[in-house]
Amino acid sequence: MELVDTHAHIDMLEGYAEYYIEQAAENNVSRIIIPGIEPEGFAPVVEIAERFKNIFFELGVFPSEAEKWSDECLELITELARHPKCVGIGEIGLDYYWDKSFVDKQKEVFIKQIEIANRLKLPITVHDREAHNDTLEIIDKYNKSSQIVFHCFSGDIDFMKKVVERGYYIAIGGIVTFKKADTLKKVASEVPLDRLLLETDAPYLAPVPYRGKENQPAYIKYTAEEIAKLRGISLEEIAEVTTRNAEKVFNI
């Protein structure tokens, strides 16, 4: 059995990357993708991926960092995204939870990065928090060819159906193990298996039994176990299908 963590900020974990990668391997996590979120953080992400065979990366400017966008940033992402271990553009998108004062800038930067992904024929990992309609509207209008992954999915069943009917993917993390996560549990139960991906979003959102503590890729098994239980199928089946989906989307 093998699992793929499609979204883990290993560069943000306390301690050495080697430790977390070893822990992941001991828990059947065969590959990990690190997302970039701001230009200043790209170098450590690339460095980790270059050091470890089973680590890959994405590059993007996170919504809350949108005001840092510049022509130089566009050029940097375009250049680094040609690296053989870069497997996508992300995480990018819209976030209306913390600050709505620069929504237009968020949208502008999101669109520019969609265009980069299209030019380079790379998938896109989308951050969408309390911005479902605007996020999907922008993707519908500007995305021409890139596969889309909705990272840390937070929508309801109806929104999930809108996403998967477009052929996009739903990535689910540790929140699904939380006792009161009824909506996400329902999504996890009903999302088509061929559209499902697993992630940790480490160091954030650790699953039960580690809720409230630092998350790490090794803990992805708890998310996989919960989804398997919700669907009434084996852990091995969840592992097999989500690994196959990750290989297909990210070409890893």
Image (cartoon, rainbow, N blue to C red):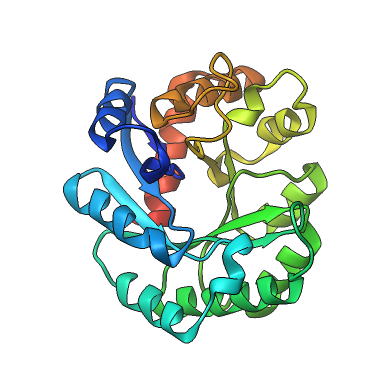
Q: Residue at x 68, y 55 (%)?
A: 128
Q: Which residue is drawn at 74% across and 53% down?
A: 98
Q: Is residue 61 visible?
A: yes
- How many numbered markers are drawn? 0
User: x%, y% of residue 82?
Assistant: 29, 72
Q: Which residue is drawn at 31% across and 71% down?
A: 80
For residue 167, what is the image quadrant?
Answer: bottom right
Left/right of residue 156 with respect to residue 9 in the rendered view: right
Q: Residue at x 48, y 20 (%)?
A: 235
User: x%, y% of residue 243?
Assistant: 40, 39
Q: Is residue 24 above or below residue 244?
A: above
230 and 111: which one is in front? Answer: 111
User: x%, y% of residue 57?
Assistant: 35, 55
Q: Is residue 227 above or below residue 168?
A: above
Quarter of the figure that contains the N terminus? top left
For residue 142, what is the image quadrant?
Answer: bottom right
Left/right of residue 206 with respect to residue 95 in the rendered view: left
153 and 145: which one is in front? Answer: 153
Q: Can residue 252 be seen in this view?
A: no
Q: Is residue 132 above or below residue 171?
A: below
For residue 26, what is the image quadrant?
Answer: top left
5 and 14: which one is in front? Answer: 14
